[in-house]
Amino acid sequence: MNKKRILIIDDDVPLTLSMKINLEDIGDYEVRVENSSLKAVAAAREFRPDLILLDIVMPDLDGGDVSAQMKSDPMLADVPILMVTALVSNSETGSDDVVSSGDQLMVAKPIKFDKLVHAIESRLAGEL
């Protein structure tokens, strides 16, 4: 089976470690973590993910800046991004598990793992 590649970009080391372990335990995903927003684009170019989970509030570059850099990079422009943020609440995501803001899809922190997996699967299937 061909595992989908997910890149997690978030400065919260314990959270990213937990997400990586839990996603890899499912067995469908190969996961890489980058905890520095300054290294995010290089990590994505090297890893070539099928999906990026990107925090919004980070030191150095925020998630919006990182997303804009990726969208302007021909190698990364078509890689779907799910923003992971405490700027929205789980109650705002509702039954769809995500909130849409402009062209960004956001998953709420604190992360509910079942909602995250559903959002990942839906995004990878092109349903979001």
Image (cartoon, helix red, strand yellow):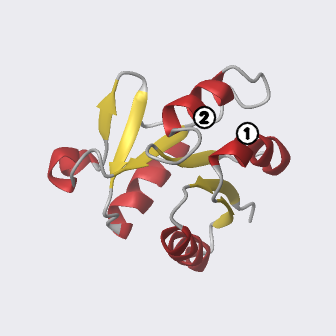
Tell me whether circle 2 and circle 1 mark residues in contact (CB < 8 Å): yes
Point out residue 93 in the picture as x, y percentages from the top left corner.
Answer: 23, 46
Residue at image coords 58%, 80%: 25
Residue at image coords 63%, 46%: 37
Q: How many marks?
A: 2
Specify few, some or many for label 1: CA neighbours under 10 Å numbering under 14, 14-19, or 20 or more: some
Residue 125 in sight from this viewpoint: no
Q: Quadrant of residue 106?
A: top left
Q: Vertically, is 93 above or below 17?
A: above
Residue at image coords 42%, 23%: 103
Q: Which residue is mark 2?
A: 66
Residue found at the far left of this picture: 91
In the displayed structure image, the side of residue 29 where residue 109 appears, left or right:
left
Residue type for callout 1: Val
Residue type for callout 2: Val
Point out residue 61 in the picture as x, y percentages from the top left corner.
Answer: 58, 38
Alpha-carbon distance for marks 2 and 1?
A: 7 Å
Point out residue 12 in the picture as x, y percentages from the top left corner.
Answer: 50, 64
Residue found at the far right of this picture: 46
Image quarter hosting the C terminus:
top left
Residue found at the far front of this picture: 60
Image quarter hosting the N terminus:
bottom right
Q: Which residue is mark 1?
A: 41
Residue at image coords 67%, 46%: 50
In the displayed structure image, the side of residue 2 where residue 101 appears, left or right:
left
Point out residue 122 in the picture as x, y percentages from the top left corner.
Answer: 44, 47
